[in-house]
């Protein structure tokens, strides 16, 4: 019970620090994750095996993690690293697209379509 209360307190503190935007979000997240590992797992639960079970790092080094032929069986123990890697890849891709100017081009293209094709139709209906 104490471990759960500590985890909730750390989460609320992390959320408040992210909202306040005084410290970089990635720093807040990494520090709170380390504090969670130390306080919740190390001090409250006193179990290093629980840390390894939750991090689920051994799962990354299995063949089934990288290649599953049509199987939808998911294990629900620990961190789902395939989701974390997928989201990280999406973030990297979006950041690259933003630096290349894709979103600015997309917004300008949509604005041109609205101005020259949609607006005359809407004005004609009035």
Image (cartoon, rainbow, N blue to C red):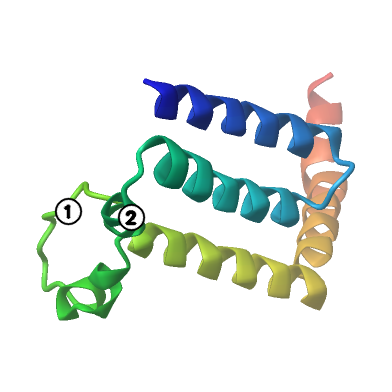
Horizontal side, residue 48 vs residue 69: left or right: right
Crowding at label 1, few (<14), some or many (≥20) Cα neighbours within 10 Å? Answer: few
Residue drawn at the location 77% of the way across and 41% of the way down: 118
Residue drawn at the location 42% of the way across and 35% of the way down: 44
Residue drawn at the location 85% of the way across and 58% of the way down: 108
The numbered disc on residue 74 is: 1
Which image quarter: residue 53? Answer: bottom left
Residue 97 to residue 21: above or below:
below
Horizontal side, residue 120 vs residue 12: left or right: right
The secondary structure type at the circle numbered 2 is: helix
Instruction: Give how far across and how far down residue 54 sits, in percent.
Output: 32, 52
Residue drawn at the location 81% of the way across and 52% of the way down: 24
Which image quarter: residue 11? Answer: top right
Choose between 67 and 36: the one closer to the eye. 36
> Mark 2 = which residue?
48
Give how far apart the Cα atoms at labels 2 and 1 are. 24 Å
The numbered disc on residue 33 is: none
Q: How many marks?
A: 2
The secondary structure type at the circle numbered 1 is: loop
Residue 5 to residue 84: above or below:
above
């Amino acid at each position: 019970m104490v471990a759960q209360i500590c985890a909730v307190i750390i989460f609320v503190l992390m959320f408040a620090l992210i909202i306040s935007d005084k410290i970089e979000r990635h720093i807040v997240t990494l520090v709170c994750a380390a504090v969670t590992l130390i306080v919740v797992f190390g001090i409250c639960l006193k179990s290093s095996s629980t840390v390894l079970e939750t991090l689920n790092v051994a799962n990354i080094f299995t063949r089934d993690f990288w290649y599953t032929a049509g199987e939808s069986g998911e294990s629900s123990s620990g961190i789902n690293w395939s989701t974390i890697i997928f989201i990280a890849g999406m973030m990297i891709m979006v950041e690259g697209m933003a630096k290349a100017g894709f979103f600015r081009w997309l917004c300008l293209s949509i604005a041109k379509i609205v101005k020259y094709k949609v607006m005359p139709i809407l004005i004609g209906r009035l």
